[in-house]
Image (spheres, helix red, strand yellow):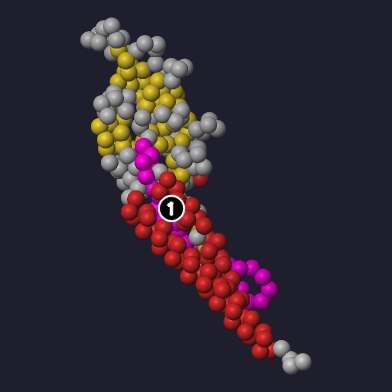
Amino acid sequence: MDKLAFTALASIDNESNVRAQITNSLANVSTIGFKDSFSLAEQSIQIEGEGINSRVLPRMAKQEVINLRPGAVNMTGNIMDVALNDKTVLGVQADNGEVGFTRRGDLRVSATGLIENAVGQLILGENGPISVPPGQLVSIGPDGSVTSKSPSDPEGTSLNLGQLMLRDASEMPLIRRADGLFQPLTGELRGRDFPTGPNSVSLQSGALEGSNVNPVEAMVKMMDFNRAFESKIKIISEIKSIDESGSSMMRLPQ
């Protein structure tokens, strides 16, 4: 009985990661460029201790591999809004100075003249942050090239400001960082740039990509999780009742 109770309790503890993942997905249904993550993998662990080493329990490996399935694209008409195509990701500078990646494309020019997104994350180019001269009109090409023109001379020569750090992640599994950005699953590449994949990178300007979370599917997962949680709690309660009944039968009569 103790083994059954311990197994049920360990399962409840491990599934807290699943609950956090589903809750995060539901909270970001309307977040621009948000990407859902694949189900957490289950692995077996050996329980150490006295006796025969035959005790093995399942455990959830907390590894949120990003699902880069495209979300719905909404046309905005804003020349600095970009929607990344296929499995293209955009490099940004994290708060700790590391390189992270995102699908968020609501770009703007900050007060310091650098390109950032709507949550203040600094957008990276191939040679670092991209600086925009004061008063310039910025446009972004399908290949990620950033140019600007003077508002007083829209037909004049364009000034090349740089190239966005775009990478193809079709063959590079990405995981979610604590700050919500993406980074390579490979340990030595975490917090750094990674080689682009075989597919060409591109974007669509004047548009924004929505979240790829299916709210109905996420709600169904949450309901299934709640049912499984209730079942395991009932198992533990029933085991307690059986154990108490067995103990009362073993008592000596007074």
Residue shown at the point (36%, 37%) measured from the top left: 32
For label 1, the SS is helix
Percent from the top left, x then y, of residue 37?
40, 50
Residue shown at the point (38%, 39%) measured from the top left: 31
Name the main secondary structure of what is drawn in magenta: loop
| Furthest-right residue in this view | 254
In front: 212, or 222?
222
In front: 198, or 148?
148
Percent from the top left, x then y, of residue 80?
32, 24
Instruction: Give the residues drawn in magenta, as a range.
Output: 29-57
Percent from the top left, x then y, of residue 164?
36, 27
What's the residue type where badge 1 is placed? Ile
Percent from the top left, x then y, of residue 74?
26, 35
Residue shown at the point (43%, 53%) measured from the top left: 22
Q: Tell whether position 51 is magenta.
A: yes
- Could you tell whether 72 is left or right of 48 in the image? left
Residue at mark 1: 22
In front: 104, or 68?
104
Q: Is residue 162 above or below residue 100?
A: above
- Could you tell whether 5 is left or right of 190 in the image? right
